[in-house]
Image (cartoon, grey):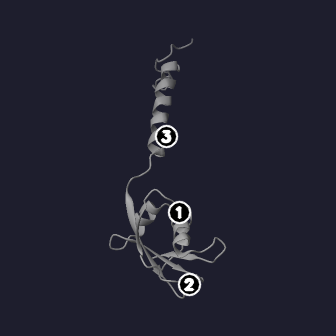
Amino acid sequence: MAQASGSPDDSGRQAALPWTPGDATETATEALQALDTYKKKDPFKVVVRFKAVGNAPIMRQNFYKITASNRFQAVIQFLRKELGWKSGDPLFTYINLAFSPAPDDTVSNLYKSFATEGHLIVNYSTTAAWG
């Protein structure tokens, strides 16, 4: 004997209700709202402090505000531009003299995890300073 849709089966669970076109509209609307939220830039800015290591040139200004949603690659490109270095010139970057972050890390994540006195400290060098 077939059971009616929505009635409990032998195990006491509710049988799946049939799909309705209204469900798709709600799901699509939620998905579009989520995409719009993801696409919005985070207006939050992070203070990044650049410190030279070894024989790297010292910057005249070493505090900059950078958008938190940027990838660390943007910080590297900005640093190269400020120093006047070409893309082929060696540049090694470190956070708090400890590790070299991946270029796809976000500035926000690095700041939340490794901020010191309200700044994200980025050390830079022309040679590998730490392993």
For marks 1 and 2, give the one nearer the viewer.
Answer: 1
**Amino acid type assigned to the residue bearing label 1 in the image:** Ala
Dot 3 falls on a residue whose secondary structure is helix
Q: Position of residue 98 (x, y in %)?
A: 48, 78
Answer whether labels 3 and 1 touch (C-beta < 8 Å): no
**Amino acid type assigned to the residue bearing label 3 in the image:** Leu
In this rendering, is residue 75 above or below 42? Answer: below
Residue occupied by mark 3: 35
Q: CA distance from mark 1 to mark 2?
A: 21 Å
Q: Quadrant of the N terminus?
A: top right
Mark 1 or 2, nearer chain start: 1
In this rendering, is residue 4 above or below 73? Answer: above
For marks 3 and 1, give the one nearer the viewer.
Answer: 1
**Amino acid type assigned to the residue bearing label 2 in the image:** Ala
In this rendering, is residue 45 above or below 85? Answer: above
Residue occupied by mark 1: 74
Residue occupied by mark 2: 129
Res 101 visible: no
Dot 1 falls on a residue whose secondary structure is helix
Q: Residue furthest left?
A: 117
| Quarter holding residue 65 | bottom left
Q: Position of residue 128 (x, y in %)?
A: 59, 82
- x 51%, y 13%: residue: 4
In this rendering, is residue 27 above or below 53? Answer: above
Of 62 and 100, which appears nearest the observer? 62
Q: Position of residue 89 (x, y in %)?
A: 64, 76
Res 128 visible: yes
| Label 3: few (<14), some (14–19) or many (≥20) C-alpha neighbours in 10 Å | few
Mark 2 or 3, nearer chain start: 3
Dot 2 falls on a residue whose secondary structure is loop
| Label 1: few (<14), some (14–19) or many (≥20) C-alpha neighbours in 10 Å | some
